[in-house]
Amino acid sequence: EGLWLKCDGCRQIVWKKALEENQNVCPRCSYHFRVDAASRLKQLFDGSWETFDTGLASSNPLAFVDSKPYTERLSSMEKATSLRDAVISAAGTLAGRPVYICAFELKFIGGSVGAAVGEKITRAIERSIAERKPLIIVSASGGMRMQEGAVSLMQMAKMSAALMALDEAGIPFISVLTDPTTGGTTASFAMLGDLNVGEPGAQIGFAGPRVIEQTIRQKLPEGFQRAEFLLKTGMLDAVVKRTELKQYIAKSLDFFCGRVA
């Protein structure tokens, strides 16, 4: 028990160790399993990394309660993930080049963006500008966090404005969109990269397919909101396998910034 997994792509039984050695990509059909934020950083950085703003956490400005109080939900997520919120902000080297990387943790309230996440990403952008280092954001998010209402929605404008300053400073931003990247995340920073890269099979969109079908009263095309469809329609610049992503980003940064001395 625990040594084998059934692949959601080919439905075959896969040895868990073989899957982990292949960066959680099925060796048979190349189905990309979801991975956590720490694994993302391990896959992209050369070695160790420095984390920032680890103490930042969302408050409860609306005293929000759904099936449980928002404060209880935050506390339970912190215990489950060992994170204060849904993103890790870090610095290290990628193929020898100093970079900043923000990686989302989907298990923390669906990787949703509240005030703390918006602030951490904005601070990462500001560090990139101050130190003239490229920025990479790996998104895995359901969008803005409903428990924070308008406070959450305001983060879209804040992060987008910070990215405009990054662009004006001539510092590259590479956005990696993984499964899923939806809602306000897609509607703001995730689609504002100098290079927008999707993982194979990733669901990427704003509203859900069912909502869109009911709104336009039309049947959506096959594979709608999948990375390959968005590449075909011009919404993404590339779809890159996880095992090739680090090399692809390194080559892209060589193009943007010149080779590392």
Image: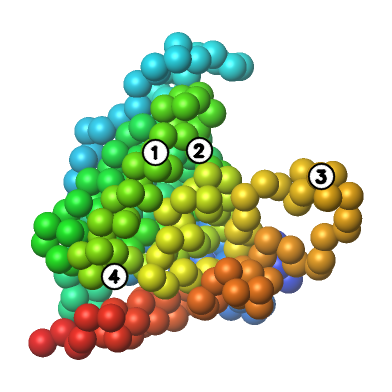
Identify the secondary structure beneath mark 3: helix
Which disc number belongs to residue 139? none
Q: Mark 4 points at which residue?
A: 172
Amino acid type, mark 4 = Pro
* C-alpha separation, residue under disc 2 versus residue under disc 1: 8 Å
Q: For this view, does 184 lie left or right of residue 50?
A: right
Is the C-beta separation of discs 2 and 1 under 8 Å? Answer: yes
Disc count in the image?
4
In this rendering, the answer to whether 119 lies above or below 57 is below
Q: Between residues 226 and 242, which one lies in front from this camera angle?
A: 226
First in sequence, mark 4 or 1: give its number. Answer: 1
* C-alpha separation, residue under disc 4 versus residue under disc 2: 25 Å
Q: Can residue 170 be seen in this view?
A: yes
Is the C-beta separation of discs 2 and 3 under 8 Å? Answer: no
Q: Mark 1 points at which residue?
A: 155
* C-alpha separation, residue under disc 3 versus residue under disc 4: 37 Å
Q: Residue at 35%, 77% (x, y): give it.
A: 249
Q: For this view, does 15 lie left or right of residue 42?
A: right
Q: Quadrant of residue 205?
A: bottom right
Q: Mark 2 points at which residue?
A: 144
| Disc 2 versus disc 3: nearer the observer | 3
Q: Name the residue under label 3.
A: 215
Q: Residue at 47%, 19% (x, y): give it.
A: 70
